[in-house]
Amino acid sequence: MRGVEFFQGTLDSTDEIESARVFDTTLRDGEQSPGTSFSYDDKRQIASILDEMGTHVIEAGFPVNSDAEFEAVRDIASATSSTTCGLARVVDKDIEAALDSGVEMVHTFVSTSDVQIEDSMHATREEVVQRAVESVERIKDAGVTCMFSPMDATRTDEEFLIDVIEAVTEAGTDWINIPDTCGVATPTRFRAMIEKVCAHTDAQVDVHTHDDFGLATANALAGIEAGAAQAQVSVNSIGERAGNAAYEEYVMAVESLYQTDTGIDTTRITELSNVVEEKSGMDTPGNKPVVGANAFSHESGIHAAGVIENSDTFEPGVMTPEMVGAQRRLVMGKHTGTHSVRERLVECGFAPTDEQVRAVTRRVKDYGAEKRRVTVDDLERFATEAGVERQQDHEEVRA
């Protein structure tokens, strides 16, 4: 399903990145969405799909949080081939719980912005650096892959941020995650920040972006363009406050816009989205990119007519519904045109004349204008009332 050639035009450059890894945090940050709580079975099911799709890292949870959380993380770590990650503060009991859960990666974090150091941690910059270094060393001594995050990096004094990054790099961290914890980054600024971080560490760089201003996925991609190897994403964009960069948006942008193979089985994206929607209790908006009900739906007469002729006319072309396991839909309503109505009538087994198509289209438009959903039953009723023959009856008359 990959390899749809990028359209030649003003935006035909696709050589900005060579690779992009996927770190999924649906089961950890995604679960922090207000009102969302995944059961043990929910986590196992979602992790299984993520694993089968080829997701590089699955952040299974926060092991120290509870016995149930610990068991879920441990079982996911033992049952999946993806790298399983457990979250831990720079606190001994957190790190021990993560190590005991059997994860291959421990993601440890500490606040680095002054507002969080002073008003949340009630600590000093010196204590932050000390705890960060000691935690990285503890994880590395255990022989486990270490990821370190300077929390609230985008609101951290730049000089101090670099000091922390250099300190944990020297301590041996494998990964440095740069989180836009409060979603205040813009793509241009975030790209410059990641370029600077990459220049001050030998560790691989990962990015974690939030969607408070609707820029999470754009910022994640900017980070990849700047040299980051991996982005942390969440299915359906669920997560704290307005959520995280969306798994489906990030993966399909890399695959289709950058023409770079992520290794993800994109044909299961819609299935994954539906499962997370059900288990999280968070409805997916109809206009959600990639996985929303309207992502590949058309009502406007001009659009529907074009798509019937060639779907590339009013769809990206480089991303098709088949690529994400979805289906294209022609929706009937106030804006529906004759091309769409004729198509649907034929699909329902009718053989309409041009005049009958126009009559049924008027009924569809009037019905849709009253903000009522036009169903197939409605369409068949309109066709019958307009005297449209069924295909079989039409053929018999001709015979």
Image: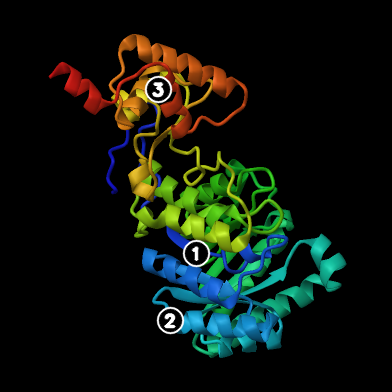
Which residue is located at x 56 percent, y 67 percent? 176
- Between 345 and 220, the residue placed more toward the observer is 345
Tell me the residue that label 1 is attached to: 23
Establish if 63 lies above or below 287. below
Residue 384: numbered disc = 3
Q: Residue 386: in sight, yes or no? A: yes
The amino acid on which the numbered mark 3 sits, given as a three-letter code, is Thr
| Residue to which mark 2 is pinned | 79
Name the side, left or right, on which 379 lies relative to 278: left
Look at discs 2 and 1 and give the one toward the viewer. 2
Quarter of the image with the C terminus is top left
Q: Residue furthest left?
A: 399
Q: CA distance from mark 1 to mark 3?
A: 53 Å
SS of the residue at dot 3? Answer: helix
Residue at 57% across, 77% down:
40
Distance of mark 2 from mark 3, alpha carbons? 56 Å
Q: Mark 1: which amino acid?
A: Phe
Answer few, some or many: residues within 10 Å of disc 3's Cα (few below 14, many 20 plus, some between 14 and 19). Answer: some
Q: Position of residue 186 (x, y in %)?
A: 63, 43
The crowding category of the residue bearing disc 2, from other C-alpha atoms within 10 Å (few below 14, some 14 to 19, many at least 20), is: some
Q: Position of residue 235 (x, y in %)?
A: 53, 57
Q: Quadrant of residue 98?
A: bottom right
Q: Nearer the viewer, mark 1 or mark 3?
A: 3
Q: Is residue 71 left or right of residue 15?
A: right
Mark nearer the N terminus (2 vs 1): 1
| Along the line of sight, the residue nearer the viewer: 353 or 291 | 353
Secondary structure under tag 2 reads helix
What's the residue at 51%, 29% (across, down)? Answer: 374
Label 1 residue SS: strand
Q: Which picture quadrant has residue 30?
A: bottom right
143 is higher (above) or lower (below) than 239: below
